[in-house]
């Protein structure tokens, strides 16, 4: 297993890519309204990344081993879609929840981030609670990041928080190392046991991106080659940040003016 450590100018470039990815979500936010289609959101994002940011949307034509090329520039995962939802021509409805996942490549370096949106003003209490708890679960994992901690500490923090709230954690997809490669080592599981797996070192860069289901954790693969849904058709939520392990803790790369504030248990001086 080889985890590449990032230093110096790598980190400067990752900071830029991370902020750009987050700024795409900032740009999209006012457009996430009842009636818009996810294909329209994809076009807005694509044009902004290519023309304004002069960057590359990493998902477009991305073809991991065993997959067909991903056909769009962002992922839009609505309601019972867990991840990798392909933008389409169905309008979002008042009360839907949608994850928008953006990955940009700038000067060869990746930034990968996603947020949940509750569409309109009719989201159910359960839907809003799932989105809010999943956000907090991501930050419970981030808060564990410092040199000497273990990847298992991150997974355990996320799993215990989510399961104590009555939700389930998806096992088949995980966070990942990232840099000049979209998905690299290590795998960052969102469940596990403290003190297990890889020990963290300064310069490691990876995502934390828990997928949390309102019902059971089992998944179902759609026949489009990409879309993953909950087997029991229950709602699913996900948030994602890209971060680096620093000498004293972590630095989140995928922040921008429109990022939701971290929960109160996160101190502003963790780096
Ligand atoms: N952005 C996703 C992640 O967080 C990966 C999407 S792959 C795609 O890892 F091809 F579907 F875009
Ligand atoms: Co990711
Ligand atoms: Co992502």
Image: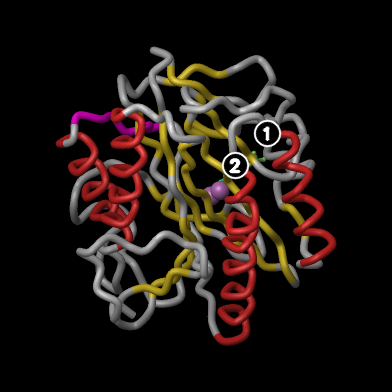
Number of numbered discs: 2
Q: Tell me the magenta residue range.
A: 166-171
Instruction: For ligand 3, tell me if the residue under mark 2 lies within 8 Å.
Output: no
Residues at marks 2 and 1 touching, judged by CB atoms closer than 8 Å: yes
Judge left or right: residue 147 versus residue 218: left
User: Helix or strand or loop: what does disc 1 sit on?
Assistant: loop
Image point (18%, 42%), residue name: 160
Q: How is colour applied across the structure in the image?
A: secondary structure
Residue positioned most to the bottom:
8
User: Helix or strand or loop: what does disc 2 sit on?
Assistant: loop
Image point (29%, 55%), residue name: 141
Give yes or no for residue 126 being in the magenta stretch: no
Q: Quadrant of residue 125?
A: top left
Q: Quadrant of the C terminus?
A: bottom left
- CA–CA distance in space, label 2 to label 1: 7 Å
Q: Quadrant of residue 222?
A: top right
Residue position for label 1: 36
Q: Position of residue 1 (x, y in %)?
A: 47, 56
């Amino acid at each position: 297993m080889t985890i590449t450590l990032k230093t110096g100018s790598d980190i400067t470039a990752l900071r830029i890519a991370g902020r750009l990815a987050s700024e795409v979500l900032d740009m999209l936010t006012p457009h996430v309204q009842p009636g818009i289609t996810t294909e329209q959101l994809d076009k807005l994002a694509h044009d902004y990344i290519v023309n304004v940011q002069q960057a590359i949307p990493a998902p477009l034509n991305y073809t991991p081993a065993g997959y067909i090329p991903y056909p769009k520039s962002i992922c839009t995962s609505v309601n019972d879609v867990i991840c990798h939802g392909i933008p389409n021509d169905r309008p979002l409805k008042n009360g839907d929840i949608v994850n928008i996942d953006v990955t940009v490549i700038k000067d060869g370096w990746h930034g990968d981030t996603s947020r949940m949106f509750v569409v309109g003003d009719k989201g159910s209490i359960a839907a809003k609670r799932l989105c809010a708890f999943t956000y907090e679960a991501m930050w419970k994992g981030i808060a564990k990041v410092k040199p000497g901690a273990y990847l298992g500490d991150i997974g355990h923090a996320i799993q215990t928080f989510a399961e104590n709230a009555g939700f389930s954690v998806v096992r088949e997809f995980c966070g990942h190392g990232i840099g000049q490669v979209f998905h690299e080592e290590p795998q960052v599981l969102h469940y596990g046991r403290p003190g297990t797996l890889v020990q963290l070192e300064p310069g490691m860069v990876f995502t934390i991106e828990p997928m949390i289901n309102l019902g059971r954790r089992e998944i179902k693969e759609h026949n489009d080659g990409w879309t993953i849904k909950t087997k029991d058709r229950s709602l699913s939520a996900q948030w994602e940040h890209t971060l680096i392990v620093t000498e004293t803790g972590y630095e989140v790369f995928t922040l921008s003016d429109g990022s939701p504030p971290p929960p109160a248990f996160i101190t502003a001086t963790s780096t």
